Image: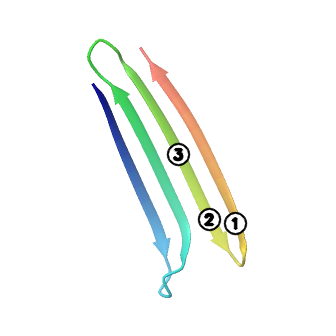
């Protein structure tokens, strides 16, 4: 059985503009397997510029 969870956190200004967002996706398989896949994305916007960062990780026993 595969379990998946998505978590999104945002920083929102009073004028409803999103200036930062972090998103984490985790997938884990159970039963006889022991695997965890995780993806982390961070996006930041300021003064008409933006930057982003993405990291992937994998773990198995």
SS of the residue under disc 1: strand
Q: Which residue is mark 3?
A: 40
Residue at horizontal 50 percent and vertical 57 percent from the top:
22
Q: Quadrant of residue 42?
A: bottom right
Q: Quadrant of residue 52?
A: bottom right
21 relative to 57, above or below: below
Q: Position of residue 60 (x, y in %)?
A: 44, 18
Quadrant where the N terminus is found in the figure: top left
Gap in angstroms between the C-alphas marked 3 and 1: 17 Å
Q: Which residue is mark 2?
A: 44
Label 2 crowd bin: few (<14), some (14–19), many (20+), radius 10 Å? some
Label 3 crowd bin: few (<14), some (14–19), many (20+), radius 10 Å? some
SS of the residue under disc 2: strand
61 relative to 28, above or below: above
- Number of numbered discs: 3
Residue at horizontal 48 percent and vertical 53 percent from the top:
23
Label 1 crowd bin: few (<14), some (14–19), many (20+), radius 10 Å? few
N-terminal of the pair, mark 2 or mark 1, is: 2
Image disc number at residue 2: none
Q: Are marks 2 and 1 in contact (CB under 8 Å)?
A: yes
N-terminal of the pair, mark 3 or mark 1, is: 3
Q: Position of residue 27 (x, y in %)?
A: 39, 34
SS of the residue under disc 3: strand
Gap in angstroms between the C-alphas marked 2 and 1: 5 Å
In the drawing, does residue 57 fall left or right of residue 30? right
Residue at horizontal 42 percent and vertical 57 percent from the top:
8
Residue extending farthest to the bottom is 15
Q: Which residue is mark 1?
A: 50
Q: Quadrant of residue 50?
A: bottom right
């Amino acid at each position: 059985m595969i379990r998946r969870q998505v978590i999104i956190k945002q920083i929102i200004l009073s004028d409803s503009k999103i200036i930062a967002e972090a998103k984490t996706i985790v997938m884990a398989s159970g039963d006889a397997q022991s695997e965890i896949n995780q993806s982390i994305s961070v996006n930041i916007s300021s003064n008409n510029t933006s930057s982003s960062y993405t990291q992937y990780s994998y773990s198995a026993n």
